[in-house]
Image (spheres, grey):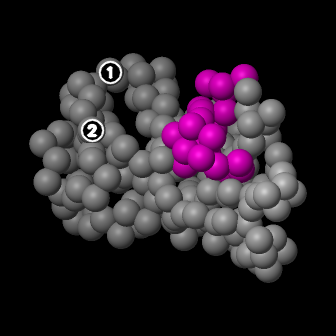
Amino acid sequence: MTLSSIPLRIGAVSYLNTKPLVYGLKQRLPDAEISYDLPSRLADDLAASNLDIALIPTVEYFADPGYEIISDACIACRGPVLSVSLLSRVPMNEITSLALDEGSRTSIALVQVLLNVHHNIVPKLSSLPIGASARDVDADAVLVIGDRAMTELENDFSFHWDLGEQWCQWSDTSFVFAMWTARA
């Protein structure tokens, strides 16, 4: 087997907001192996060299000097994003405990910056396991991402903040959640 006959292994996020970024990919790269998973798992697979290219959380790119951005196509926002939400049972200034969706490391960093730096709130953190329902979490607030953020019933929570919107209002800049990355 020659190096050129080894299929390119590409990992893409399994959420609806990734569809425009992967549309037509299989037709353009028919020999590529394309897999779909959660952003955090894609980052782990790229780090373990199980993937050649992946759409990974932005914080992962900055954590590894061996990564290179390979495209300007990304998951980003300049306002409401709908797929990254902080749901709370109490007003923001009363949040003392926060469950974090294990699916994305960038969204975890974002909610911590918004709460800790912008609002001076440092809640006790716990995990929201992949596949678990946000309703069942024993925390004041919960970070949910991806399709789950768009389908969780807001009726179970008194407060809802779109974190893309919160970031853009505070910083007056866009926010990049995930980017196409490869090992340099």
Q: Secondary structure at mark 2?
A: strand
Q: Amino acid at mark 2?
A: Ser
Residue at the disc numbered 1: 122
Q: Residues within 10 Å of mark 2 (few under 14, many from 20)?
A: some
Q: What are the residue bounds of the magenta stretch?
A: 42-65
Q: Nearer the viewer, residue 63 or 161?
A: 63
Q: Is residue 89 above or below residue 108?
A: below
Q: Nearer the viewer, residue 129 or 29?
A: 29
Q: Amino acid at mark 1?
A: Val
Tell me which residue sits at (55%, 44%) in the image.
45
Closer to viewer: mark 2 or mark 1: 2
Residue at the disc numbered 2: 127
Image coords of residue 179 (percent x, y): 70, 47
Tell me which residue sits at (82%, 46%) in the image.
70
Tell me which residue sits at (48%, 44%) in the image.
40
Q: Secondary structure at mark 1?
A: loop
Image coords of residue 6 (percent x, y): 77, 58
Q: Residues within 10 Å of mark 1 (few under 14, many from 20)?
A: some
| Quadrant housing the C terminus | top right
Magenta span has 46? yes
| Distance between mark 2 and mark 1 Cα atoms | 15 Å
Q: Residue farthest to the front? A: 1
Q: Is residue 74 above or below residue 93?
A: below
